[in-house]
Image: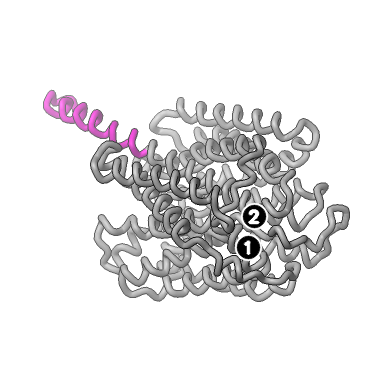
Amino acid sequence: MSAPDDLRAIAPFAAADVATDIAPDVAPDIATWAAFLLMCLGMFMAILDIQVVATSLPTIQRALGISQDAMSWIQTAYLIAEVIAIPLTGLLTRALTLRWLFACGVSLFTLASIGCAFSQDFATLLMFRVIQGFSGGVLIPAVFSAAFLLFPPRLYGVAKAIGGVVAVFAPTIGPVVGGYITETWSWPWLFLINVIPGLTAATATPFLLPRHKTNLRELRQLDLGTLAVMALALASLEIGLKQAPQRGWLSLSCAGLLFASVIGLFVFLRRTSRAKHPVLRLEALKRRSFAVACALSFCLGVGLFGSVYLMPVFLGFVRRHDAFEIGTIMLVTGLAQLAAAPVAAILEKRIGPLRLTALGFALFAFGLALSYFEPRTADFDEMFWPQIVRGIAIMFCLLPPMHIALGDLPESEVADASGMFNLMRNLGGAIGIALIDTILYGRSVVYGEALRLRLLAGDL
């Protein structure tokens, strides 16, 4: 269940006083491509981790003796830390440079994965999940800003396609990987699979990425009060959205959390707009193209994470499939995304990003409509073509808005803009999942009453 970000669900290296080593008309060398692919590997690990752990939560619960109420916090802690880290990527990039931000982030993620694997109690696991979420959160937006900073404009489409496929393919194969590991090995391997790729990326990227001087003054000048307000606002929003479907949107606790998040966001924006050294640079929001792209990213998050969340719920609870079988069925979407990525890059050049985005959202709506008419006995065959349509549409909805958002920005704005762009997708996913859960919990009362009446009437 990602709100992934999570499924759900993505920031870099430019700064006002930092220039890229690669001129717009110079082809990137092998080292640049290798560094970018290793960054994509790090992002893949961070996104995949959400899904493989979600698949095996009952196994972890039994192994560590975690209560049913506390079990969901294994995921929630990760997602809260991730959503806080994403908008901070620009600040951390200005302070550490892309090279050391990614190396530190992937190293910390790898160490936290080892800590999770050897946790003996819930508190220890939760602590390492928070570290995992924060370090994973900075890896995701770094890739998408790097696509615009490491490559010339003529290669934007290729770099975006690679990053986009990785970002959406990871949650698709997550249930397959998680189910296989749980059934074949044991739950610690859900985290230990990150070690070898993590060490590889952490060791190699410092030698491959462009070298720039760090600027640690950015951290010393940090407005800690504004940072705390932002973190509390985002955490309140995530927790409020998680609890609202069960407790009710107007319950005292949920309404209080959601109201606090709105007030916190207002205070954050007000303080940030007046700060000499802001936590998050908001200049990009003055551009209409970027604001529109963020809105599109939010809408994609609602549909993408919502559909990725709802399918396993249906296949698991209605069709009684196990995690591996669910992942096998959902793999169709991932394969369609792989096939559609190069097509999306070509079409974007020919018809433009705006037209391709419109086509993508129309196709995505059509794919969702096809699923609406599926019977409760639907399985692989019935879900095949709706998944194909949605898989193609997702790439048309993801890649063009990314270009609209980041393609024309000056380098000094790309890092912060990438964080905001990806944050909107994650927030869209969180809200989409909350709305779906609200419908599911709300309808359960209706269906429960109908079942009771049929039992009383002897109709079952």
Q: Count numbered badges in the picture.
A: 2
**In the rendered image, is residue 438 in sight?**
yes
Whether the magenta-drawn stretch holds residue 441 is answered as yes
Taking 321 as reference, is 255 left or right? left
* Amino acid identity at mark 2: Ala
Where residue 364 sits: x, y (%)? 57, 32
* First-in-chain label (2 vs 1): 1
Taking 116 as reference, is 357 left or right? right
Return the residue at label 1.
93
Residue 415, label in figure: 2
- x 27%, y 38%: residue: 248
Judge by depth and name the residue closer to the eye, 274 or 133.
274
The quadrant of the rendering that contains the C terminus is top left
**In the rendered image, is residue 7 in sight?**
no
* Amino acid identity at mark 1: Thr
Residue 453 sits in which quadrant?
Answer: top left
Using the numbered discs, state the Cα–Cα distance from disc 2 to disc 1 in whole angstroms.
7 Å
Say above or below: 378 vs 79: above
Is the stretch drawn in magenta largely helix, strand or loop?
A: helix
Residue 53 sits in which quadrant?
Answer: bottom left
Where residue 434 sits: x, y (%)? 38, 40
Taking 281 as reference, is 450 left or right? left
Taking 319 as reference, is 420 left or right? right
Whether the magenta-drawn stretch holds residue 24 is answered as no
How are the colours assigned in the image? one colour
* Magenta stretch bounds: 437-460
Where residue 194 sits: x, y (%)? 54, 68
